Image (cartoon, helix red, strand yellow):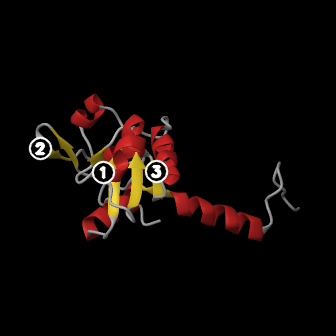
């Protein structure tokens, strides 16, 4: 017996174009961590949250630039030609999407980091807090406990 989807799947060429487009504008915490660790040239990771959230914790090496200030301050803080990755709180927040839109409007190559700060922390990656660099144990619902990557 042949099973069918309730909604038919797109033709493979349509699906390939869609997923390639998504990968062009989205990244995940594991890939950002790998790029930061490798010192990828031209990468600028931008935390678009407010001051209180930034002080609570942020990615090592991130630039603090709240969304409302991007249009006015990006040119002074982010070199032309940089590849920007934006993040905010997590999947329940579209702040990183709004920040990425602002950077795109300014002509930057930009991606949004899926999962945001929440998934960075949940995957056991290091964050900068007022107490210094800290790590929480990986949440086994987001990453294997023995490594910081899901190997996907």
Mark sitting earlier along the chain (1/2): 1
**Callout 3 secondary element:** helix
Task: Identify the residue at image location x=27%, y=31%.
Answer: 51
Task: Quickly name the residue at label 1.
Answer: 76
Q: Closer to the camera, 136 or 17?
A: 17
Q: Closer to the camera, 69 or 64?
A: 69
Disc 1 + disc 3, Cβ < 8 Å: no
Mark sitting earlier along the chain (1/3): 1
User: Most extreme residue toward the top, as rendered?
Assistant: 52
Task: Quickly name the residue at label 3.
Answer: 103
What's the distance in space between the residues labelled 3 and 2, CA to CA? 29 Å
Please name which of the two marks, 1 or 2, marks the residue nearer to the observer. Answer: 1
* Side of 72 relative to 14 (left or right): left
Q: Closer to the camera, 149 or 3?
A: 149
Residue 72 drawn at (x, y percent): 38, 41
Task: Identify the residue at image location x=38%, y=53%.
Answer: 143
Residue 48 is at least partly visible in this image: no
What's the distance in space between the residues labelled 1 and 3, CA to CA? 13 Å
As drawn, 36 above or below 112? below
What's the distance in space between the residues labelled 1 and 2, CA to CA? 27 Å
The numbered mark at residue 132 is: 2
Task: Identify the residue at image location x=24%, y=44%.
Answer: 136
User: Most extreme residue toward the left, as rendered?
Assistant: 131
């Amino acid at each position: 017996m042949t099973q069918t989807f309730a909604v038919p799947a797109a033709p493979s060429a349509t699906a390939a174009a869609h997923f390639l487009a998504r990968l062009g504008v989205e990244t995940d915490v594991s890939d950002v961590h790998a790029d930061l660790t490798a010192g990828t040239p031209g990468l600028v990771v931008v935390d678009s949250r407010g001051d209180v959230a930034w002080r609570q914790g942020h990615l090592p090496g991130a630039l603090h630039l709240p969304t409302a200030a991007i249009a006015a301050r990006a040119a002074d803080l982010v070199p032309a030609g940089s590849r920007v990755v934006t993040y905010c709180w997590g999947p329940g927040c579209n702040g990183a999407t709004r920040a990425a839109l602002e950077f795109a409007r300014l002509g930057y190559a930009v991606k949004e980091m899926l999962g945001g700060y929440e998934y960075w922390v949940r995957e056991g990656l290091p964050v900068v807090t007022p107490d210094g660099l800290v790590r929480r144990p990986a949440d086994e619902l987001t990453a294997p406990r023995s490594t910081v990557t899901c190997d996907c």
